[in-house]
Structures are given as structure tokens and as C-alpha cells.
């Protein structure tokens, strides 16, 4: 008995540590489709990319070699490990004032230079706007890079030093550097050159680990004794800025899910990205309801498989905005134990092998500062996807999703975060395309890339029958989070309260995936709560929260 008690304590400790995915596609935790669409995420920019002017330029004046055009990243895996912070949109630099017209003025020294330095540091200049002149870059000095070569950094900057560059081209260069995802922070400073109209660049970078842990899964339930999984990402694959992501989870010996993504950040110098992925999954769901005698019981067990591939393209027309188009084809298999109930299961999934060809479209706006642990800014995304019946697809449906997050810094280090989500599905869709209630409910285990490892439902605090909510056609979610960030965008302690409503017009008494005999009311809604701590590290975002403990209750 003591050994079992110690094992339980150890399991709770291990299970309470997780690496939640970076939230672009799912600013509201839950929507599993965001796992794919987050590959198209808006790239965060380096933490410090203001370009102040230095008084002196130590070292040589050699011109930087002209590299190939860099490839800015307009697609980021959802959270697939971006760990740099947002930067201001405009440079707002007084570079022209920093370069004296008279070359001899550099040696003048004295009080005039001190006064000039004080003026440059003044806050009043931040409101000024200057024309966009061109400057000759004499030197690019790079420090802090141990894993990324100077040549690769120059390629990412893509500054043609054989001709004068403008402030706009410098801003574009810093965005390309940020979009690579290879750096935790970057500090780019302009330095006066040897004469009028000449500048040097001092670039100090802090590199990220080439392996990022997006999420770690562990838990227990009545459905399966134990489940666990890992979602990891490799940056700079094979010496390029291409990325590879793999997520794998297993629940017992019969259920697993595997998702592999390959990202090409940019096509030459166009703001277009490509993503390719393959998925394989095998799982099962129980069908629960009243038997012929009126006794609630497990009516049948559905075993299903999901195998297919996805190809996507992303486009960044303007800053903060991303568009995505994704094509998906899946081969689906359904088997069940009871021959008597088999025809009644076609509304969930076609019997035997079937095909699903779907199109996904998404538009997103993201102005958050510090997307891992945001303290300001907003996020809005609209997703549409659907399928039509044809020779290779046996399903026809239309699905719409709208997600939103707003962050308000109510006082220094204190953040109010508001998350909303709304979704509706119309038509004949496979059941896993519906909105799964536990994906949005913090007090019960959610799915892992469409794999449902548990059959427990909500606690139904209001007695509305919410414990019977599972795969639903309509879902609305509202969450309020208060976060204290003693280290801004690096560490936060948070508490969240959320309300989630879901329903299906003709749900009947049978429930798929959740073992609950509750009678659903006219407005099935429930509350959930969560609290914990999140820490941003070189290897991902570590979260220790109450929801991880709920995953281990095994109810």
C-alpha cells in the first residue's frame, strides 16, 4: 500500500509538469485544428530591435559580404516553439542626425558631443518622423552566435551592402532575422561610419536551443490505465531554417496518434511559406446510453483509424496579418462490436473504409507582445473548413471557427487576459471534426491531436447536464485570466475562470466518448477553473497547473 501511495505521488508530480504548445492557432486552449494551422503563425520579433546610435565604432571597417536573399518565416508551427518577443513596428531612428555632415566634426569632442548624446537619448525624439534616406553600410558586426554561422545570419538579414540601404530595408532585415525562430533575443544598433551617409551595424544575438519541446502529455483514466506523449520541434534542420515537428502519444496498447510536419519558411524572397504533414491515428470511443431495460450502460465500442496527409500555403500581405490555405485528405476506418447497432452509427462515421477531402482557410491578425506569455496586444482569427461529397470523399459539411484574445496591462507586471471562442458545424461530418467539450474544459482531459484518452466529462457545477457534453455541433467559450508577471514575458503566475457552452440540436440520449447519464438541459453550460505558473525557457514553455492534476485523477 505504501508503495502504491508513493507511486501515486510521483505520478502526480510528473504529470503536473507540461510543456503547453505555443498559442497562435489556439489563443483559446482547446481547438485541436489549431495544431495544424499554427504552423502558419505570425512570427514574433526579437525582444530588442530598437536601433540606437553608438558614439564609436570599434574594430575594423570591412564591408560585409553580400549574401543570398534571406527567407523570412511567415509560417510558424502553433505553436511550434517561437520564443522571441514582439518588437515595435517602426524604427523611428534619427540616423541622419547621428552622422555629422563634416567628417572633421567627429573629432570635435567636448561639451557639444555630450549634449548631442543627451539629445539622442531624449524621449521627445521617439515621436519624430524623418524621410527614408539611404545609407552605405560599412560594417556588420555580429556577436553571441555560437550555433548559427555569420554567413547564415547575413543571409537572413539579406542586406545588399554593395549599394545604399534605407531604413525600410533595415526594418525588413530585422523581421527576417526574427522570423527565423533561431534567436531568443536580438539587439541591433546603428553606429556612425567614417563619413556622412555611412553607418555600421552592431548585432548582438542570443540563440535558442535547436530542439524545442512544445508539449508533454501524461495522465490516467478509466478508459485507459495510462497515457503519455511528446510534441517536439527541430529548428534549423540540416543547416537551413527549415523546421521539422513530430508529435506522438500513446494510450495503452491499442491507441496512438502520430503527426509529423515539415515547414519551408519562405519561397525565395516572397512572403509565402509551405507546410507538409502526415498523420496516422488509431483509437476507440465508447457509445453510452440507456439499454432496452432503461439501464444506463455501454452500448457499443467504436474502433476507428485516421490516416492521411496535408499540404498548406501561407501568405503574409502586411505586418501582423497571415492568410492560410490547407488541403487535407484522410482515409478513415470504422469498426464496431455490435451488428445490431451498426447502422445507427453511420451518423458518427461511415462503416468500413471511407474518404475525407477537406479544405481549410484561415485569416489571422496578431499584435501580441510576447506570444508565449503576452502582456499586451490582441489576436483574432477566422477559420473556415469544409468538405463536399464526391468520388473520393463521403462527407459533406461546413465548419466555422472564430477565436480571439486580448491582453491588457492593468498595472506594471499585472495582466488581464480575455479569451473567447465560437464555433458551429453544419452537415454530415465525422464525429472527430465536431467540437469536443473537454478540449475547452480545464478540469477534464482534452484530446491529444484528436486522440481522446479519457471518458470522463465535466463536473456539471450548475446541474445543466453539461457532464454529458462530448462531440457537439455548437460551442462557445469565454475565459478570464489574471496573470502576475514578476519577470515580464518570462514568468507568470495565473488564475483562470472560464465558462463553456456546447450543444447539438438532436443529440438524443446516447453519448459518444463520455460515460455520463445526465439529462441535458436547455442550456448546457459549465464553469472551469485553473491556476498555476508558466516559465519561458530555452527549450519551451513549462507550465505547472491545476489542470495537470485533474488529468491524473482517473475518474
Image (cartoon, helix red, strand yellow):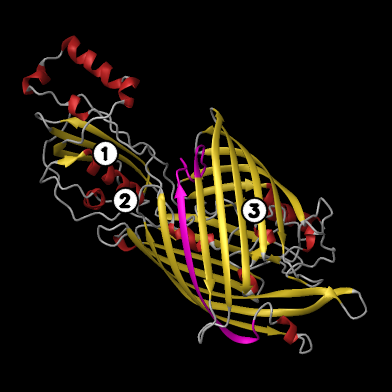
Image quarter of the N terminus: bottom right
Q: Mark 3 against mark 1, which lies toward the viewer?
A: 1
Which badge, 3 or 2, comes first in the chain's sequence?
3
Residue 157 percent coordinates (x, y): 24, 48
**Among the two numbered marks 3 and 1 on one chain, the one whose residue lies closer to the N terminus:** 3
Q: Tell me if 511 is positioned left or right of 19 in this view.
A: right
Dot 1: element: strand
Query: Which residue is labeled 3 in the image?
Result: 14
Can you tell which of label 2 and label 1 is closer to the viewer? 1
Residue beneath the point at 30% across and 35% down: 91
Marked residue nearer the N-terminal end (2 or 1)? 2
Q: How many residues crowd around disc 3 within 10 Å: few (fewer than 14), some, or many (20 or more)?
A: some
User: Among all residues in the image, which is located at the extreme top?
Assistant: 111
Which quadrant of the rendered structure holds the C terminus? Answer: bottom right
Query: Which quarter of the picture shows residue 76?
Result: bottom left
- What's drawn in magenta, residue-wise? 350-378
Q: Residue at x 79, y 68 (%)?
A: 515
Front position in the image: 124 or 514: 124
* Gap in angstroms between the C-alphas marked 3 and 2: 31 Å
Specify the label residue 203 is tagged with: 1
Amino acid at each position: 500500500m505504501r508503495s502504491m501511495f508513493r507511486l501515486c505521488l510521483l505520478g502526480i508530480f510528473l504529470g503536473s509538469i507540461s510543456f503547453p504548445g505555443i498559442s497562435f492557432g489556439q489563443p483559446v486552449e482547446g481547438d485541436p485544428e489549431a495544431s495544424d494551422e499554427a504552423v502558419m503563425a505570425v512570427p514574433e520579433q526579437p525582444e530588442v530591435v530598437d536601433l540606437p546610435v553608438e558614439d564609436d565604432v570599434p574594430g575594423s571597417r570591412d564591408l560585409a559580404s553580400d549574401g543570398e536573399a534571406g527567407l523570412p518565416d511567415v509560417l510558424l508551427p502553433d505553436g511550434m516553439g517561437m520564443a522571441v518577443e514582439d518588437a515595435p513596428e517602426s524604427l523611428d531612428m534619427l540616423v541622419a542626425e547621428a552622422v555629422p555632415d563634416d567628417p572633421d566634426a567627429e573629432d570635435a569632442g567636448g561639451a557639444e558631443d555630450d549634449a548631442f548624446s543627451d539629445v539622442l537619448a531624449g524621449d521627445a525624439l521617439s515621436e519624430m518622423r524623418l524621410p527614408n534616406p539611404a545609407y552605405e553600410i560599412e560594417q556588420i558586426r555580429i556577436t553571441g552566435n555560437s550555433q548559427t554561422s555569420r554567413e547564415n545570419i547575413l543571409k537572413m538579414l539579406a542586406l545588399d551592402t554593395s549599394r545604399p540601404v534605407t531604413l525600410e530595408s533595415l526594418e525588413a532585415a530585422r523581421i527576417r532575422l526574427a522570423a527565423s525562430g533561431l534567436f531568443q533575443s536580438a539587439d541591433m544598433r546603428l553606429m556612425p561610419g567614417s563619413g556622412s551617409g555611412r553607418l555600421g551595424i552592431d548585432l548582438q544575438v542570443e540563440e535558442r536551443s535547436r530542439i524545442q519541446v512544445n508539449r508533454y502529455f501524461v495522465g490516467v483514466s478509466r478508459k485507459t490505465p495510462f497515457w503519455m506523449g511528446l510534441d517536439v520541434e527541430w529548428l534549423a534542420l540540416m543547416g537551413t531554417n527549415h523546421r521539422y515537428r513530430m508529435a506522438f502519444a500513446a494510450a495503452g496498447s491499442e491507441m496512438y496518434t502520430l503527426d509529423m510536419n515539415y515547414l519551408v519558411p519562405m519561397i525565395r524572397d516572397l512572403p509565402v511559406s509551405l507546410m507538409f504533414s502526415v498523420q496516422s491515428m488509431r483509437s476507440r470511443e465508447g457509445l453510452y446510453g440507456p439499454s432496452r431495460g432503461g439501464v444506463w450502460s455501454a452500448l457499443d465500442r467504436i474502433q476507428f483509424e485516421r490516416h492521411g496527409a496535408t499540404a498548406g500555403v501561407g501568405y503574409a500581405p502586411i505586418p501582423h496579418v497571415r492568410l492560410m490555405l490547407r488541403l487535407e485528405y484522410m482515409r478513415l476506418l470504422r469498426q464496431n462490436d455490435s451488428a445490431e447497432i451498426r447502422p445507427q452509427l453511420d451518423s458518427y462515421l461511415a462503416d468500413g473504409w471511407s474518404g475525407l477531402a477537406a479544405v481549410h482557410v484561415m485569416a489571422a491578425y496578431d499584435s501580441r507582445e510576447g506570444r508565449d506569455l503576452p502582456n499586451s496586444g490582441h489576436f483574432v482569427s477566422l477559420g473556415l473548413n469544409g468538405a463536399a461529397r464526391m468520388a473520393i470523399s463521403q462527407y459533406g459539411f461546413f465548419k466555422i471557427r472564430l477565436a480571439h484574445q486580448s491582453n491588457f496591462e492593468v498595472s506594471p507586471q499585472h495582466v488581464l487576459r480575455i479569451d473567447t471562442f465560437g464555433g458551429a458545424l453544419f452537415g454530415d461530418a465525422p464525429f472527430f471534426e465536431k467540437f469536443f467539450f473537454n478540449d475547452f474544459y480545464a478540469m477534464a482531459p482534452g484530446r491529444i491531436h484528436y486522440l481522446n484518452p479519457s471518458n470522463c466529462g465535466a463536473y456539471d457545477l450548475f446541474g445543466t447536464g453539461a457532464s454529458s457534453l462530448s462531440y457537439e455541433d455548437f460551442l462557445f467559450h469565454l475565459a478570464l485570466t489574471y496573470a502576475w508577471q514578476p519577470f515580464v514575458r518570462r514568468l507568470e503566475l495565473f488564475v483562470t475562470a472560464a465558462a463553456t457552452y456546447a450543444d447539438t440540436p438532436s443529440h438524443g440520449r446516447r453519448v459518444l466518448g463520455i460515460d455520463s447519464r445526465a439529462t441535458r438541459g436547455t442550456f448546457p453550460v459549465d464553469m472551469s477553473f485553473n491556476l498555476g505558473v508558466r516559465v519561458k525557457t530555452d527549450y519551451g514553455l513549462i507550465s505547472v497547473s491545476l489542470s495537470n492534476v485533474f488529468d491524473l485523477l482517473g475518474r
